[in-house]
Amino acid sequence: MLVIVYKPYEKTTTQLKSIKITGFAYFYVTDRMGSSDDSIKGIFIKRTGAGTAETAMPLDRGAYAVRLTE
């Protein structure tokens, strides 16, 4: 699944008020969740997906787009 990579931008002691999105990454879920489980087990993978790529070199977060250049 494609997930958002972010860092807290504004927070209080108990709540995130806003975040700054720093990129996207692909996450592969490796284990099923139980009915009383509140965690997800998996690994981050490098994968190319649909989307656009900017001209500047983005940070390596694990999600890539393909672009033809001369």
Image: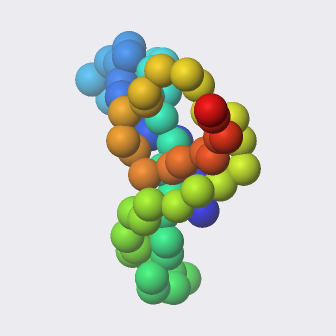
Q: Quadrant of the N terminus?
A: bottom right
Q: What's the residue at 48%, 21% (across, down)?
A: 56
> At 63% from the left edge and 34% from the top edge, which residue is drawn?
69
Q: Position of residue 57 (x, y in %)?
A: 43, 27
Determine if residue 4 is in view.
yes
Above or below, 38 against 64 in this view is below
Q: Nearer the viewer, residue 3 or 59?
A: 59
Residue 49 horizontal/vertical position (percent): 65, 54
- In the rendered picture of this protein, how many numbered marks are placed on residues? 0
Decide which of 13, 27 is in the foreground and name it.
27
Residue 48 occupies quadrant = bottom right
Residue 19 in sight: no
Question: What residue sits 54% from the left and 48% below the top?
Answer: 64
Most extreme residue toward the left is 13
- Residue visible at 49% across and 71% down? 28
- For the C terminus, the quadrant is top right
Relative horizontal placement of residue 14, taking residue 5 as reference (left or right): left
| Residue that protrudes farthest toward the top in the picture | 10
User: How is the model colour-coded?
Assistant: rainbow
Q: Is residue 12 left or right of residue 19?
A: left
Q: Position of residue 10 (x, y in %)?
A: 38, 14
Residue 9's place in the image compared with 65, above or below, is: above
Q: Position of residue 30 (x, y in %)?
A: 45, 82
